Image: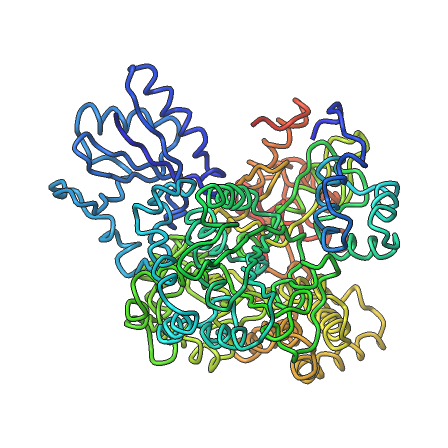
Amino acid sequence: MNKIFIGMGTCGLATGAGHVKTAVEKWAAARDMKVVVTPTGCIGYCKAEPIMDVVTDDGHRVSYGNVTADVAGFILDEVLVRKNYKLDGLLGQFKNGTTPLPGIPMIEEHPYFRKQVKYVLRNCGVIDPESLMDYRAHGGFKGFERAMGMSSEQVIQEITRSGLRGRGGSGFPAGKKWELALASKNAKKYVICNADEGDPGAFMDRSILEGDTYAVLEGMMVAGYAIGADEGIIYCRAEYPLAIERIKKAIEVLKSEGLLDAPVGPAGFQFKLRIKMGAGAFVCGEETALMASVEGRRGMPRPRPPFPSVEGLFQKPTIVNNVETMANVSHIMREGAQSFSSMGTQNSKGTKVFALTGKVANAGLVEVPMGITLREIVFDIGGGIPGGKAFKAVQIGGPSGGCIPAEHLDIKIDYESLKSVGAIMGSGGLVVMDEDTCMVDMARYFLAFITSESCGKCIPCREGTQRLYEILDSIVSPYTKMADEEENLLRFNRVLNMESLAQVIKDTSLCGLGQSAPNPVLSTLRFFRKEYEAHIYDRKCPAHQCKGLLTFSIDTNACTGCTLCAKKCPTSAIVGEKKKAHYIVDEKCIRCGTCHDVCRFDAVSVS
Amino acid sequence: METTQQTRPIDEVIAKYPKAREHLISILQEVQAEYGFLSTESINRISSYLNLPSSKIFGVATFYNQFKLNAPGRIQVAICRGTACHVKGSLNLLDSCRQLLGIEVGQTSKDGLFSLETVACLGCCSIAPAMMVNGQFFGRLDKKKLEYLIETWRASGRVEE
């Protein structure tokens, strides 16, 4: 009997892992062989999805990437029948107690994994996330059992000693938060796991929930014990159907195992867990808004204090921790505070998971020790920028974060150093941008997101971000739209006030969302002021992204008059006779770029 | 979502929830999963069930992006507008999609086949640009791939598993 592991997280499924599974089963049936296909979570190397691991007869686990349904059978033939392991797409072999196969690299040595330290992601893509047995075989629930033998105070001390800080964005020390909740005297307390990963461009929490579901639940149970809560709620986004399904299953399994809804350990600790689906509101990542949403109201933040650890959900003491924090807790409890605090920098301990995406060769999920440089993440792990383009910046921390340009690539990643360059750790979205990305467009994109997600409770955020968006919009819009003299003057006036408006929003908004809303504008202004000036004074977009500022023209020498562009133009803005050079009527052009895309002679130029 | 599918009466859908406001969002989610959207009748029915003014329910339903107040198409196309997708050109993808379907974001085509919406982030940024269609994910899209997919669905009238 052979074991096959297939990465079936959301990104694996989207790239066809389901078809691979069918192909493997067909292959086995045709040869009358018995194979067990285990779906795993995501190992993080999303570029190579679908990923299939084959366990050989003598127990070696060898991993292959980019396995489509067509080649799955071929790989199985080679590996299991002909014992030939060196195939296209070979990622490496796992360390699992067997003597390594000669000539096959270890998966840890793969360039993508070499600089990574898998602490919280250790099980993702390795174990079957739906099997409690598999989780236990990898040390699962040892941490919870250890906690059961300690007092609440001792558990909190352990977490405090580890130096774990909230992974959701603000970096508040987890131990401190728990201590406050423990100190609040109340018979009813809540533990909430914030899995409302609304930050566009981030998917760490999804991967952990899908790939190592039990670790998150174990962390919540430890937290419940530590603060004296008897109820836990996972607030998960509705956009993560697979994660929700797995959490639901896991809760049922834990119930049947007597770990939930029944007294456990010497103290008779009894805990219940339930899942609450979010309904799509970015502001619900803010803890007071999240609690309002759990109570069935509009997810609007309220002023703090009182802090949730004193007065939270249903006016009871509540702690809200992020998914990654909770998963870390279970590993810290098992391996001790030292295992975590030995990594990282002075004030930021442990590892951090980043969702590395955008214009980078190896997009995926990376876990690195704090203190690593951005350059190492983008170039050594990420493999640099594809297509020989130049690196421009990384956007870190989502809509509340900032851009870090090339000159700060050697910055060491921790909470404080990121703040010093106007960015934040955030939940860990790391979007790489190359020379083709326009920074004004990025700022405008984030502002558009914020304006639609602002809850509307406080004026600076509701009105201020709207005005800020309008200013950015006017910067990238063509002049012709604003023929009016007066309107043009007003426009300049607004641009002049843009920076101070951003500052006012930052200083006066009610919650973290509003206070950080102008960050994308402020940070791009700080590092890419020239680009703004090019838009405002020269009416040019250096990256050719802002459509309103582009002019399309046809090179009369290169044009063969094939009429293809004229046929495809949605507004009939291209005129010309057959076999003669064509022209674009600028007034009619909507800058859709279709002519540029379809031209086979490179005759359409953009400036 | 097949229109031919039998739907349960609304009272049956909501009966399993205790009559408390904290279950409002879960109730709305379940009702929408059953009917595809929240009709005025549904909202009124939930209102009397929870003893909560319809206006409050309307307030909650419009606050969250998930809830729809109009009937969606049988094939619901949701284009991801997350940061990674934006950097990889999801705006152009959205434009192509609007042209191909002949509808704007938030609308349903006249024949009731397609509806188009955007989502903040699908969380599969590594395969950007991405979209979700009837719960299935499609990644690494470009104009050509999108054209092919939509033509296939238009011809068959449904999304293959």
Q: Who's the residue at 82% across and 57% down the image?
A: B59
Q: Position of residue A247 (x, y in %)?
A: 51, 46
Relative vertical location of residue A233 with respect to residue A55 in this rendering, above or below: below
Q: How many marks?
A: 0
Relative vertical location of residue A59 with respect to residue A335 in this rendering, above or below: above
**Whether residue A164 is visible:** yes
Q: Say which quarter of the image contains residue B109.
A: top right
Relative vertical location of residue A436 with respect to residue A467 in this rendering, above or below: above
Q: Is residue A336 left or right of residue B114?
A: left
Q: Is residue B48 left or right of residue B1?
A: right
A471 and A217: which one is in front? Answer: A217
A593 and A93: which one is in front? Answer: A93
Q: Is residue B42 left or right of residue A71?
A: right
Query: Which quadrant does the C terminus of chain A fall into?
Result: bottom right
Q: Who's the residue at 66% across and 39% down the image?
A: B77
Q: Position of residue A473 (x, y in %)?
A: 71, 67
**Whether residue A433 is visible:** no
Q: How is the image coloured?
A: rainbow
A591 and A448: which one is in front? Answer: A448
Q: Position of residue B96 (x, y in %)?
A: 66, 43
Relative vertical location of residue A333 with respect to residue A273 in this rendering, above or below: below
Query: Which quadrant does the N terminus of chain A fall into?
Result: top left
Q: Is residue A471 left or right of residue A91?
A: right
Q: Position of residue A402 (x, y in %)?
A: 53, 72
